[in-house]
Amino acid sequence: MTIFKPINENEVMGKVKEVFDDIKTTRKIEDVPNFWKYIANDPDTLERTWSSMKQVMKKGALDEMTKELIYVAVSVTNGCEYCIRSHSAAAMKKGATKEMLSEMIAVTGMANEANRLVEGYQVELDNKFK
Amino acid sequence: MTIFKPINENEVMGKVKEVFDDIKTTRKIEDVPNFWKYIANDPDTLERTWSSMKQVMKKGALDEMTKELIYVAVSVTNGCEYCIRSHSAAAMKKGATKEMLSEMIAVTGMANEANRLVEGYQVELDNKFK
Amino acid sequence: MTIFKPINENEVMGKVKEVFDDIKTTRKIEDVPNFWKYIANDPDTLERTWSSMKQVMKKGALDEMTKELIYVAVSVTNGCEYCIRSHSAAAMKKGATKEMLSEMIAVTGMANEANRLVEGYQVELDNKFK
Amino acid sequence: MTIFKPINENEVMGKVKEVFDDIKTTRKIEDVPNFWKYIANDPDTLERTWSSMKQVMKKGALDEMTKELIYVAVSVTNGCEYCIRSHSAAAMKKGATKEMLSEMIAVTGMANEANRLVEGYQVELDNKFK
Amino acid sequence: MTIFKPINENEVMGKVKEVFDDIKTTRKIEDVPNFWKYIANDPDTLERTWSSMKQVMKKGALDEMTKELIYVAVSVTNGCEYCIRSHSAAAMKKGATKEMLSEMIAVTGMANEANRLVEGYQVELDNKFK
Amino acid sequence: MTIFKPINENEVMGKVKEVFDDIKTTRKIEDVPNFWKYIANDPDTLERTWSSMKQVMKKGALDEMTKELIYVAVSVTNGCEYCIRSHSAAAMKKGATKEMLSEMIAVTGMANEANRLVEGYQVELDNKFK
């Protein structure tokens, strides 16, 4: 028994249909990914999250590929398989190579290690960072 | 009472002195940051971590600024104040603007939120990601 | 090869049997859930955890449903699938609707995002919170 | 040296001023809390986050106090001091007593413990949760 | 304003006094550490946590020093300053040297790094671990 | 579609072959575990990680079994299934019994719980730990 099931994209209306259509148009894809189909159980969350995702992930001072790599680094730190797989694919679609993904993973590993060395030794802030 | 104290850079010899000198030369700084002074309590960890940090953070398929931004995104996710402050400064030294840092933080926030929506709804992998 | 296997509820005696019986009586269920069968590998942990769980999750200043929702919010943050699935079901048994679960997930996502905005910007405590 | 400083509420204009005014009106407070002043460094993030926060935390299937308690439980799990202090205060403003806060903390501790027992023993999903 | 204040050990009675006395006797210390004084705001949590802590941390198949080192490794991973400082001191009281603490921190850093390499590359279980 | 696939140990040359051979010799095993086959996609990361792992996990002030237990405790806290399964097996190979693993899990659960009680009550450092 699973509590939430993905919302069938052929049966949606109103606000949910509008968001689903915008996802397919914006991303140039034919099927709505499962993430959006599941959160469509809560139309307000669907609309808010899609609108936020578009704003946050679009080209700004940082390009879209860099943003996807940062997104994956966070998801790796949190251990979210779905997020790692879908946004690694998104990063490649935006131009990331396997070498770039490997380097992002190496940096993510290094930061996770060094974060704990800092905690373990209870390193004090240098004066210049205060 | 604190268990570990920073190692005074004027009193070091041998392996620790070599690493401290290399840090100052490579980073073009006059003082060794506290992080390295604390982990110098364990010379093997100092040497290994410095050598790894240099390899991982140097320009490769990704440039140094992007790597610093990824490093900060991980540190923000883990809530490590020292790491956030020191590597945000490092990112700026490598060319990051406040706008870039703000966008990195926004992506980090968004990914942390979406990771939990995925867990909360127990979203299944799309077939194309299996 | 898995190291720990669930303890068969038909073969238990003594302290483990007593806890298993109490679980079935208290929860009004016919089978002991896997969580308890696995931690029964360590009878002291089984007894202590069951006794703590009963005390912590029972109606007090907060009702049982609210406690289950809080439990799931933590499990979502940690990404523990078993815990999310079993306690989401427990929340529904105590009266939670899908709408309530969806709102709990939305709050959990929002808090995870805002926690990182606070870290990223290194927000200082307002005077009134000091 | 800190990179981001709080935006002075007497010097804001346009979108930032509108959000600051709405925060003070909606929350019935005289000063804008530091969280909003810091993220105002990025007006888009300020506007998006305030709008999301209002939507997510308002009374729905769950009441506002319960939502604040869930928010604090997540912040405790992530160890975000600012978030714990400000939203514990918000929960009390919405009617939470110290007893309720204590029980929320106890549930948060219990869930964090049990999540790890599940991982440590690698507990398999019961058939009914599949 | 802080919501919870430490309970004064000269003003306690009943269950709280009993636990406070047992803490001082068992640990052979003259003052009750702040951790116990704060959670004494909720006498049930105080009693349950003290009783669990005594059971879990006492010599069993593992000696007390090893248990303290494991406790610190978890606290370093979670970034809990109070827990790191108090249990590092406890580990030393049970015989841990600075070298042991340094090695524990190194292992903790390494595991945190390797955990993320596993997630980043989405490493599949070897057949022998299934 | 998975982005990274394990590197076939019969087709490797140069640096990767050397590391693979050293893994098999050092660990006295006939097959290279998947972890190393996946990170071999990035030969620099493979070489650096294997060299670090050997240094960090070898007998020093702490014995190898204790180090493996600490490694698993961290992996349980992070919820990394691969890491838990492979290093629990490694701990047993180094002499850990099921009782020891159970006690390590119990300590890990306890520390995760107490870390959150500290955060929830915002426990201040005792003077002696400052």
Image (cartoon, coloured by chain):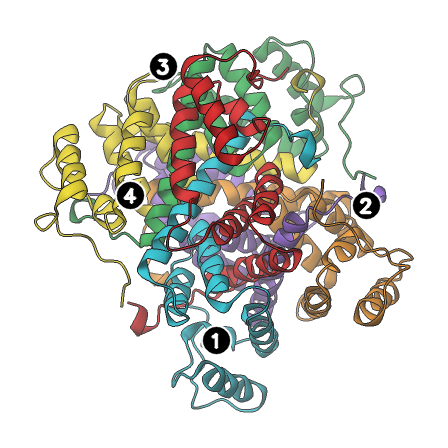
Chain colours: A cyan, B red, C purple, D orange, E green, F yellow
Q: Chain of mark 2?
A: C
Kindly report the distance in space between the C-alpha atoms of the residues bearing marks 4 and 1. 37 Å
Q: Nearer the viewer, residue E80 or C2?
A: E80
Q: Quadrant of residue A3?
A: bottom left
Left or right side of E85 for D18: right
Image disc number at residue F61: 3
Amino acid tagged 2: Asp
- How far apart are the two marked residues, 1 and 2, measured between alpha carbons? 37 Å
Q: According to the image, label 4 marks what residue?
A: F44
Looking at the image, which is closer to me, D127 or D92? D92
Q: Horizontally, is F81 left or right of D36 in the view?
A: left
Q: Is residue E58 visible?
A: no
Tell if the residue under mark 3 belongs to the same chain as the one under mark 2.
no
Residue with the mark numbered 2? C126
Q: Residues within 10 Å of mark 4 (few under 14, many from 20)?
A: some
In the rendered structure, the residue with mark 3 lies on which chain?
F
Mark whose residue sits in front, 1 or 2: 2
Q: Which mark is residue F110?
A: none
Pointer 3 and pointer 2: residues touching (CB < 8 Å)?
Answer: no
Q: CA distance from mark 1 to mark 3?
A: 51 Å
Q: Secondary structure at mark 4?
A: helix
Disc 1 is attached to a residue of which chain?
Answer: A
